[in-house]
Image (spheres, rainbow, N blue to C red):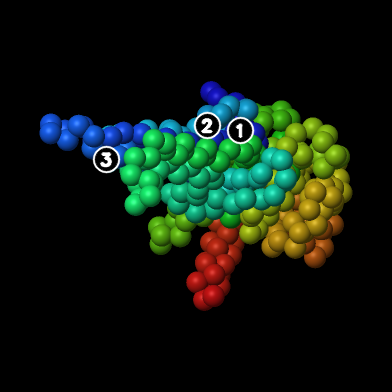
Amino acid sequence: MSRFTDSIRIRVRAGGGGAGAVSFRREKYIPRGGPDGGDGGRGGDVFIEADRRYYNLSHLFTDRLYRAEKGRQGMGMNRHGRDGKDTIIKVPPGTEVINTESGELITDLLQENVPFRIAEGGIGGKGNAFFKSSTMQTPRFAQPGIEGEELSITLNLKLIADIGLVGLPNAGKSTLLSRITNARPKIGDYPFTTLVPNLGVVEREDGLVYRIADIPGIIEGAHRGQGLGLSFLQHIERVRMILYLVDVTCEDPVYTFRLLQSELKSYSPELLKRKYHVLLTKTDLADHEIVASVMQEFSSDSPLPVSSLTGENINELLSILDTFMEKEDAEKGSH
């Protein structure tokens, strides 16, 4: 299995234009024909395009040069050189394209199958036929082609998901994701089973479709690079709702929830403005009195106790998510 890569630096170079031709017409009975050198072909462009068949950037190689074809040289008999072929680089939807040198965001590839030109090919040079005039009957020169654009870009993937699962390692995120979506993440009863983000899709019978992202477990200090959290917090920047998963059997569930919120706030205060729900997970491992006691401690946050193993409240959770997404889609459609 290929390594998950969500940030990479590459170089792109568009094709240079082909040189114009220096040529003179040579026909029987016309020993000294006029200039007939054609123009050079245009260099190919480099495009970058979002394609859902890719889910990370591991198919690309750091610092590799991705280039388009050069334009061909012009030819005699006023024949233009062939244009160079374009190059299209495929990336997952949600990939930011950043100018490595300036740090400027060039584009954010949210729409699929819409090529964005990242480097423009050079134009071909004019052949000597172009320069013929009343004062210059036999020009013996042509233009060289212009070089194509070249730059270094950084590709930065931020998963496009509607709902993000956030929790400490071993909080039950992957198990829940596999229960309510089509995702089949690696699951185990030990910390950091999930080493890469997982994306699952919920498809309801009424046609409602939404995506849920499982982010690798956050630990205290994740925003400072502790554990695995910092690398993957960027993947919840685009979500519309956050589900905080808190293991009901942990020592202090309320503290755990506040810790998760604190880490998200340290990474981006905007994340705390998102709609959220608290889920008390693994309720099959605790008796009803403990679950009820923990729920009272949360007071205003009204956590929903769930068990991916027994299915407790899974349908209610899906109902909450369905209602939220239907409302979001309706508001989006009204604008």
State the residue position of label 3. Answer: 34
Q: Are marks 1 and 2 in contact (CB under 8 Å)?
A: yes
Residue sitting at the far top: 1
Of marks 2 and 3, which one's residue comes earlier in the chain? 3
Measured from the top left, where is residue 38 in percent x and y?
32, 40
State the residue position of label 2. Answer: 66
Q: Considering the numbered disc 1 on the image, is that residue within a helix, a strand or a loop? A: strand
Of marks 1 and 3, which one's residue comes earlier in the chain? 1
Q: Residue placed at 50% from the left, 45% from the top? A: 120
Q: Amino acid at mark 3?
A: Gly
Q: Depth-wise, is mark 1 or mark 3 nearer the camera?
A: 3
Measured from the top left, where is residue 252 in percent x and y?
86, 45
Q: Amino acid at mark 1?
A: Ile
Residue sitting at the far left: 29
Residue sitting at the far front: 135
State the residue position of label 1. Answer: 10
Q: Looking at the rendering, in which quadrant would you find the C terminus?
A: bottom right
Instruction: Write down the quadrant of residue 278 in the picture.
Output: bottom right
